[in-house]
Image (spheres, rainbow, N blue to C red):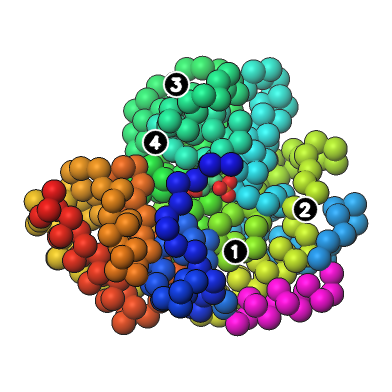
């Protein structure tokens, strides 16, 4: 189906930060397949783990114990300070699990019509519940009637949230940094303030770390910048470095709501996906890639700021770790094609925000190449407009 407007290129192979197209041309990947290939392409340890597992066992179903899934749950919960995990196959599915947990939580409190608060500008996925949770009418258009009982409040604003009086509210669901919404980084203290409001009202705090998790922003999970802890957290994207896997982590009361029969997934957490994610975590932790993302990201941000901040047409240059953005004062989707011609893969989101999510394995030299190309393209674009 025509779900995607695709660019005129197809890649045949990858190695590290480089992709090679069908004509043998090389491209520098500053997007990592939309934040998925954090370890770059064809990473030897991931390749080895997947190949080895494929030769042993791909799938058994969740009717049986899956030791690799249990090992992965152990690693994830200890990294995130959570108690339990439900495994799915995508971000949207991980969020579905989170929303179902919120509803179970509500019913347990005697709330028959539980309401989940989400933010305007958010993106939580394309399934019916997650697009209803999403705070962007474009994502919802044509799919009405939406799933009920999502209320949207402004992002990075605790005023409206703290004044909510609806006794049916059971949870607040947020991205720590809004990705699709334009790399919107909230003020320091925002998540902490939301955590406090949730505690005061007995609401669950659900954090969607699907784009921000797995070391992208300079910590394993973006909430760790604020030294808070959510009740529920979702992961996907970089967790499998390209092998589809999603995870919904929960702690405390939220971790015990899903019981046999209340939720499930045929593929979720199968041996192959679990083994791949374990290998991803091994490499991320061995190479301390959260620290590298923090350092290199800060350097890239400083350089982008010094090159672009003062230029007419640039509204803001921002980022956290290796999640970087340049916001322009006009729509700039054509920059993606301009970059492609320069053999660089970037993305434009929210119409006027250039988004960079390079693999976390980049070195200084690659970072400089990305900066030089992006700066050149942005300057040409703004001059020619
Ligand atoms: C924050 C966030 N949540 C959820 C999703 C949906 O993930 P998936 O496309 O794997 O369903 C995305 C995807 O971009 C995302 O960025």
Q: Was residue 49 drawn as part of the magenta stretch in this picture?
A: yes
Q: Which is nearer the eye, 208 or 266? A: 266
Q: Residue 130: where, in percent of width, then height?
A: 57, 35
Q: Was residue 235 drawn as part of the magenta stretch in this picture?
A: no
Q: Which mark is residue 59?
A: none
Q: In terms of sequence position, does the residue under pointer 3 or pointer 4 come before the other?
A: 4
Q: Is residue 289 above or below residue 225?
A: below
Q: Residue 235: where, in percent of width, then height?
A: 58, 53
Separation (CA) of disc 2 from disc 1:
15 Å
Which mark's residue is nearer the viewer, 3 or 1? 1
Q: Which mark is residue 267?
A: 2
Q: Is residue 138 above or below residue 5?
A: above
Which mark's residue is nearer the viewer, 1 or 4? 1
Label 2: how many residues lie within 10 Å, few (<14), some (14-19) or many (20+)? some
Task: Name which quarter of the figure residue 52 lies in.
Answer: bottom right
Residue 79 in sight: no
Q: In terms of sequence position, does the residue under pointer 1 or pointer 4 come before the other?
A: 4
Task: Name which quarter of the figure residue 115 lies in.
Answer: top right
Label 3: how many residues lie within 10 Å, few (<14), some (14-19) or many (20+)? few
Question: Which residue in the protein does label 3 denote?
Answer: 164
């Amino acid at each position: 189906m025509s779900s995607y407007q695709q660019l005129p290129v197809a890649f045949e192979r990858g190695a590290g930060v480089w992709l090679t197209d069908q004509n043998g041309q090389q491209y520098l990947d500053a997007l990592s397949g939309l934040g998925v290939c954090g370890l770059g392409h064809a990473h030897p340890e991931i390749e080895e783990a997947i190949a080895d597992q494929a030769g042993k066992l791909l799938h058994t179903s969740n009717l049986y114990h899956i030791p690799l899934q249990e090992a992965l749950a152990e690693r994830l919960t200890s990294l995130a300070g959570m108690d339990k995990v439900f495994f799915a196959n995508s971000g949207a599915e991980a969020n579905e699990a989170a929303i179902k947990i919120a509803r179970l939580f509500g019913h347990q409190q005697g709330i028959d019509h539980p309401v989940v608060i989400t933010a305007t500008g958010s993106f939580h996925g394309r399934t019916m519940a997650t697009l209803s949770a999403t705070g962007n009418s474009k994502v919802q258009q044509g799919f009405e009637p939406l799933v009920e009982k999502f209320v949207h409040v402004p992002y990075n604003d605790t005023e409206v949230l703290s004044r909510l009086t609806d006794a049916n509210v059971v949870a607040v669901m947020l991205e720590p940094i809004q990705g699709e919404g334009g790399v919107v980084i909230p003020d320091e203290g925002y998540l902490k303030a939301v955590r406090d409001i949730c505690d005061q009202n007995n609401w669950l705090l659900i954090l969607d770390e699907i784009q921000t998790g797995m070391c992208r922003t300079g910590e394993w999970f973006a909430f760790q910048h604020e030294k808070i802890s959510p009740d529920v957290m979702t992961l996907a994207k970089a967790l499998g470095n390209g092998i589809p896997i999603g995870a919904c982590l929960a702690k405390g009361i939220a971790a015990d709501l899903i019981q046999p029969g209340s939720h499930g997934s045929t593929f979720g957490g199968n041996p192959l996906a679990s083994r791949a994610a374990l290998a991803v975590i091994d490499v991320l932790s061995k190479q301390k890639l959260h620290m590298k993302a923090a350092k290199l990201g800060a350097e890239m941000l400083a350089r982008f700021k010094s090159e672009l901040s003062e230029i007419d047409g640039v509204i803001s240059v921002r980022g956290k770790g290796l999640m970087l953005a340049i916001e322009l004062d006009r729509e700039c989707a054509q920059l993606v094609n301009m970059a492609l011609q320069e053999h660089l893969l970037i993305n434009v989101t929210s119409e006027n925000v250039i988004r960079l999510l390079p693999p976390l394995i980049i070195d200084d030299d690659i970072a400089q190449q990305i900066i030089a190309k992006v700066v050149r393209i942005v300057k040409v674009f703004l001059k020619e407009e």
